Image (tube, coloured by chain):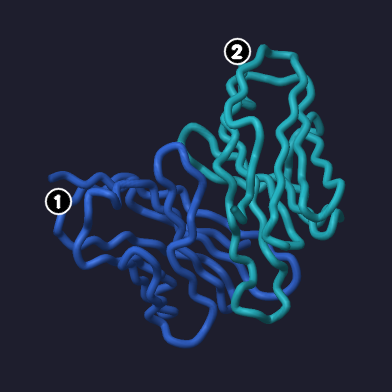
Chain colours: A cyan, B blue
Amino acid sequence: DTAVSQTPKYLVTQMGNDKSIKCEQNLGHDTMYWYKQDSKKFLKIMFSYNNKELIINETVPNRFSPKSPDKAHLNLHINSLELGDSAVYFCASSQSDRGTSGANVLTFGAGSRLTVL
Amino acid sequence: AQSVTQPDIHITVSEGASLELRCNYSYGATPYLFWYVQSPGQGLQLLLKYFSGDTLVQGIKGFEAEFKRSQSSFNLRKPSVHWSDAAEYFCAVTRSGGYQKVTFGTGTKLQVIP
């Protein structure tokens, strides 16, 4: 199936630990994103990569480090986890705007629910 | 900076009734506008989008939305709601050109009662 897939779907860990979430898309898109959805369902963009190049880097603690080994993969590593990091993290992809009607349409993964105890 | 306001946090409608979810955006130029739906435990799925042209756009699952520039609105409508439409609905805005950030509203939770 063509999709955006994230692993793991659920992650429960202790404060202070380091964890990673992986994302892969097989849609042939050139842009990938990480969004954070808090307990009130508010979605906030964290990072965006276009062809492995970081293009959006919102105000996110530097404990969060994204990495894109190629344009089909975008991983998120989080160091020294804090209680406030508990959220659902969504990966998304899109094809960058080249004047086409498909521009900026995001395809989302199913999310990774991170719980920090 | 672009922003999106969804004034209704929670809406309850009866099955078979009509639905309108409100969305107001703030953006200086012509926006690209979207509605996404999120079912419990799922990611977001695109319902419809507006880039240009006809201001009334049709989407999946029988939804439509109308872009009204004078009111800075992009309200989502459905003539007859089904129980399976119960979900969280998000309006979003971005702009054309390059690598643009998509900004989401805070969402409206739709409850459908029999």
Left or right, A86 with respect to A52, comes to left
Residue A107's place in the image compared with A115, above or below, is: below
Q: Are marks 2 and 1 on the same chain?
A: no
Q: Secondary structure at mark 2?
A: loop
Density class for disc 2 (Cα within 10 Å; few <14, some 14-19, many ≥20) is few
Residue B14's disc number: 1
What kind of residue is marked 2? Leu
Residue A117's disc number: 2
Discs 2, 1 touching: Cβ within 8 Å: no
Q: Secondary structure at mark 1?
A: strand
Percent from the top left, x then y, of residue B67? 41, 76
Residue A82's disc number: none
How far apart marks 2 and 1 lie (CA) works out to: 39 Å
Percent from the top left, x then y, of residue B49? 49, 70
Number of marks in picture: 2
What residue is shown at x 71% (from left), y 20% (from top)? A81
Percent from the top left, x then y, of residue B65? 37, 71
Residue B1's place in the image compared with B31, above or below, is: above
What residue is shown at x 38% (from left), y 75% (from top)? B58
What residue is shown at x 55% (from left), y 45% (from top)? A43
